[in-house]
Amino acid sequence: MLCAFNNVQLRWPHVAPWIYLVSDQSLPKASVQFSVKSGDLVWLRGANGVGKTTWMRMVAGLLPMSGDISWCAPTARREPMHGFFRPFLPSLDEYVQCDLMVAQEFLRRMQSPIQPALLDKLLCRFGLLAVRYYPVHALSSGQRLRLSLVPLCYTQYSIWLLDEPFAHLDDVACQLVRSLMSTHRARGGVVFLASHFVEELVDKTIELSRSHV
């Protein structure tokens, strides 16, 4: 078991609590316990506006919550276990240094020096090799979205919280995301995926709705 959730709810005034329907449990409940093991892909689903992004942000520690999440890491480990990635944002310019060339921005996001040959290989994998010397502001929105996925190559987080990672990506880029998720899971990592796209190899589904009581 890598993490366990116990009655987790957003602690926010005048907001109705979530009702959870977990795939291995028979009834929807507001008070729910479930656990996730290494290698799991957990699909977070629900109607537009139900609060999937809010749930992700809460689990990432960006919003107040009630209940408890146990991160079952070795005691020697001190760094955070989870990373919140939301490539699709109203303004990607908030996260992209638009005055840099693509290769420079790629290296900045990798946060570690790499050999030129490896850089070319990674740029090719992301479909950005042909535009490596372009300024970032000259990229299309789809190319910028690909650039925003670079942290998934180097992150050491055990648990990924991916909020709509396929939004506005073409088929090739979507396949890249799936490949990165598959590699992460093969190494024992966990992926929480908020998406309207159904993934074939989902280990657990969490469906969110809202209580009107």
Image (spheres, helix red, strand yellow):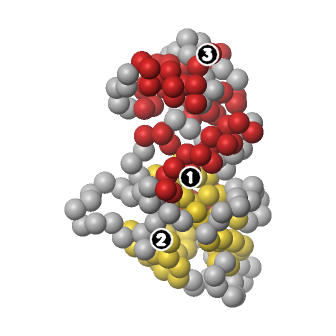
- The residue tagged 1 is 182
Q: Amino acid at mark 2?
A: Lys
Q: CA distance from mark 2 to mark 3?
A: 40 Å
- The residue tagged 2 is 37
- Side of 90 relative to 96 (left or right): right
Q: Residue furthest top?
A: 133
- Side of 67 relative to 210 (left or right): left
Q: Residue furthest bottom?
A: 26
In this rendering, is residue 131 above or below 141? above
> Nearer the N terminus, badge 1 or badge 2?
2
Query: Can you tell which quarter of the image residue 117 is in?
Result: top left
Q: Looking at the picture, tell me which residue is in the foreground, 113 or 120.
A: 120
Q: Looking at the picture, tell me which residue is in the foreground, 117 or 154.
A: 117
Q: Nearer the viewer, mark 1 or mark 3?
A: 1
Q: Position of residue 197 (x, y in %)?
A: 75, 55
Q: CA distance from mark 1 to mark 2?
A: 15 Å
In this rendering, is residue 165 above or below 68? above
In this rendering, is residue 144 above or below 20? above
Residue 189 seen in render: yes
Identify the residue at horizontal 53%, vertical 79% (top origin): 34
Q: Position of residue 29 (x, y in %)?
A: 65, 85
Marks 1,2: beta carbons within 8 A: no
Q: Amino acid at mark 1?
A: Ser
In this rendering, is residue 16 above or below 82? below
For the image, the number of numbered tags is: 3
Any mark on residue 131, and which? 3
Identify the residue at horizontal 63%, vertical 26% (top origin): 127
The quarter of the picture where the C terminus appears is bottom right
> Nearer the N terminus, badge 2 or badge 3?
2
Q: Nearer the viewer, mark 1 or mark 2?
A: 1
Q: Amino acid at mark 3?
A: Val
Q: Position of residue 138 (x, y in %)?
A: 65, 16
